[in-house]
Amino acid sequence: MHMESHPSPKISRQPLPRPLQRCWRVTTALLAMLTLGLMLATTACNKPAAVTLPPPIVIVAPVVPTNAPATAEFIGQLDSPNTVQIRARTEGFVDKIIFTDGTEVKAGDPLFKLDDKPYQERLAAANGALAEANAALNKYQKDVARLTPLAEKHAVPQQDLDNAIASVDVGKAGVLSAEAQVQSATLDVNYCDIRSPINGLIGASAVAGGDFVGKGEPTLLATISELDPIWFYCNVSEVDYLRASAEIQRTGKSFQDLPITLMVGDGSTHPETGKFVFVDRTVDPKTGTLRVRAEFANPQRLLRPGMFARISVDLGTRPNSILVPERAVAELQGNYFVWVIDAENKANRRPVKVGRQVGEQLLILEGLQPGERLVVEGLQKVRDGLLVKPMTAREMLQAVQAAQAAAATPANN
């Protein structure tokens, strides 16, 4: 789980706060008036000297390392922890469909009723055969009881007793066979009464009343899925897994302790926090990924199997991170860069590697060092090597206030 391997963030320009916007407009106007006055003075003196424009003003901010929240995001799919396909286990016509499509069912609730008349007849026949077998066994046992004392007195041949004893064994086997037939017929009758094996949400019926099912193979009748809890599956690359493992070891946590936030297709966040419950034992050599499963409570049954979703894993805090305003980062053909002002107040274009977005800021993984001055406003005025006048937002505000006070002084006199 690579905590920084996210899609490149979309760069959007965030405007300055309204007071700074007003300051920026006033300062620009004052500079324009100064330039115009200089040009008029040069023209009045008939001196063809070139007009030198002052360096453009840009607002800068120092690069300061901070503690940024470390997260990892992955895209995956929801699935039920227990999905059962209801199938016909015996042949028969669908007599009744008892449930309503798309509703919650409980374990033991009746779902389908198949025509069981043929199986009731077989059960009755099997019970009759069992009664006959028991009667025959009873006769054989009485024969043995009658012949045993006679054989001891040599009143009857020993062979007659032996045959009677053998008949008892045959009778017992006949009873067992008849009982098996009764059990088989009973199962067929019970299979005609189809009930839910679990609690869950049942889908639409796959058959209609009067359909003949179970011919040759178990016919799918309906599917039931358990929805609370719900599972989230995703495939994590080998590199992401190793990097995230290193981050977890740094914080002293385990995978099972990491809080997980689930975002669904409309961008909303699932109110329940999840946790990892399974990490596969091996990396798939074909894709180089590791299958991971997270579990979320779903008491409202809003999450359904098959939904695509995204998770954000809280890996703790990443110290000494560099966060810059989103408006300070420019993008050109998929490459990101910022403008840095050097000690000589010259602008330098600096390529950077951008990580995830944190609020209105972007995490810079490579390209910036603490203490450097970053242009946060006025990017359109600079070019590589251009001399500029850097000012912080506070300095800009103070300059504008001073200019406004100076402009208001003659009016008061």
Image: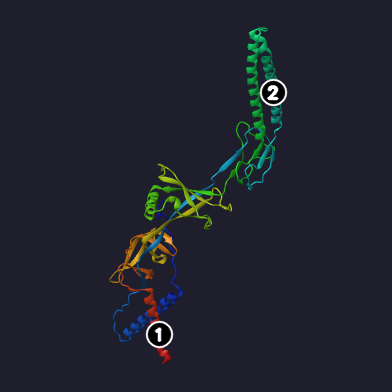
Q: How many discs mark residues in the rendered view?
A: 2
* For residue 228, side relative to residue 123 (left or right): left
What's under tag 1, amino acid-wise? Answer: Ala
For the residue pair 162 and 243, the one nearer the viewer reads as 162
Q: Nearer the viewer, residue 309 or 385?
A: 309
- Out of 248 and 214, give the one closest to the viewer: 248
Which of the pair 245/180 is nearer the observer?
A: 180
- For this orientation, the residue located farthest to the front is 153
Q: Is residue 32 visible?
A: no
- What residue appears at the point 38 percent right and 62 percent down from the top-left corner? 67
Three-letter amino acid code at the position of disc 2: Ala
Q: Position of residue 255 (x, y in %)?
A: 43, 50
The residue carrying mark 2 is 129
Q: Quadrant of residue 252?
A: bottom left
Name the mark nearer the viewer: 1 or 2. 2
Mark 1 vs mark 2, CA separation in Å: 115 Å
Q: Residue at x 38, y 82 (%)?
A: 402
| Residue 313 percent across, percent down from the top left | 45, 54
Residue under pointer 1: 405
Badge 2 local density, few (<14 within 10 Å), some, or many (20+)? Answer: some
**Secondary structure of residue under mark 2:** helix
Residue 130 visible within the image: yes
**In which quadrant is the C terminus drawn?**
bottom left
Q: Is residue 1 left or right of residue 105?
A: left
> Which of the two discs, 1 and 2, labels the residue nearer the N terminus?
2
Q: Please state the horizontal and vertical placement of residue 1, each as a whole percent of the image.
A: 41, 51
